[in-house]
Amino acid sequence: MQINSGNDADKYGFNNNDTINAAKEINLLSNLHLEGIMMIPPLMKLNEEYRSIFKKTKQIQLEIYNCGIKNCINISMGMSRDYHMAIEEGATHVRIGTALFGSRT
């Protein structure tokens, strides 16, 4: 489930206020199992404000888990430039394509 925890107008996903209710609705669907959330942070300076977006994402994952959706244990957040910070804040999956394959042309 993609969330827009950074409230970035250029990114997609559920906003912070709708995420828990959407997760509960998804959980009611018999053929879907919500195993985690993912987010892409806004493009901004890597600082404590940026880190707070990862912290908020982890908090949302825990809220989903604690409301009874015990399959929701994964968080995909962090890319090549910020994956260290994302892991420190609870990422279970990171996307490091640029670090592996170089910049897109």
Image (spheres, rainbow, N blue to C red):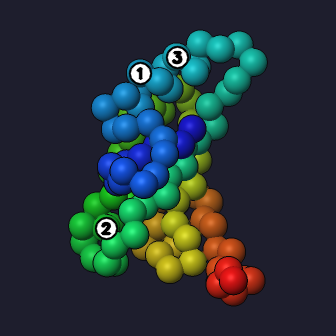
Q: Do the residues labelled 3 and 1 touch (CB within 8 Å)?
A: yes
Look at the numbered disc 1 and give the secondary structure of its residue. Answer: helix
Q: Is residue 42 left or right of 82 when viewed as pictured?
A: left
103 up-or-down from 55: above or below: below
Q: Residues within 10 Å of mark 2 (few under 14, many from 20)?
A: some
Expressed as whole percent of the image width and height from the top left, the position of residue 57 reads 40, 50
Q: Do the residues labelled 2 and 1 touch (CB within 8 Å)?
A: no
Question: Which amino acid type is marked by label 2?
Answer: Tyr
Question: Residue 29, labelled with which disc?
Answer: none
Residue 67 in sight in this render: no
Q: How crowded is mark 1: few (under 14 residues within 10 Å), some or many (20 or more)?
A: few
At 65% from the left and 14% from the top, the residue drawn is 29
Spatial CA span between label 3 and label 2:
29 Å
Spatial CA span between label 3 and label 1:
6 Å
Question: Camera-side residue: 67 or 105?
Answer: 105
Question: Which amino acid type is marked by label 1?
Answer: Asn
Look at the numbered disc 2 and give the secondary structure of its residue. Answer: helix
Where does label 1 land, which residue? Answer: 21
Q: Which image quadrant: the N terminus?
A: top right
Question: Residue 25, labelled with which disc?
Answer: 3
Expressed as whole percent of the image width and height from the top left, the position of residue 8 reads 36, 53
Question: Would you identify the image quadrant in which residue 19 lies?
Answer: top left
Q: Is residue 30 left or right of 5 when viewed as pictured?
A: right
**Mark 2 vs mark 1: which is more N-terminal?**
1
Question: Residue 50, labelled with which disc?
Answer: 2
Question: Which amino acid type is marked by label 3?
Answer: Glu
Look at the numbered disc 3 and give the secondary structure of its residue. Answer: helix
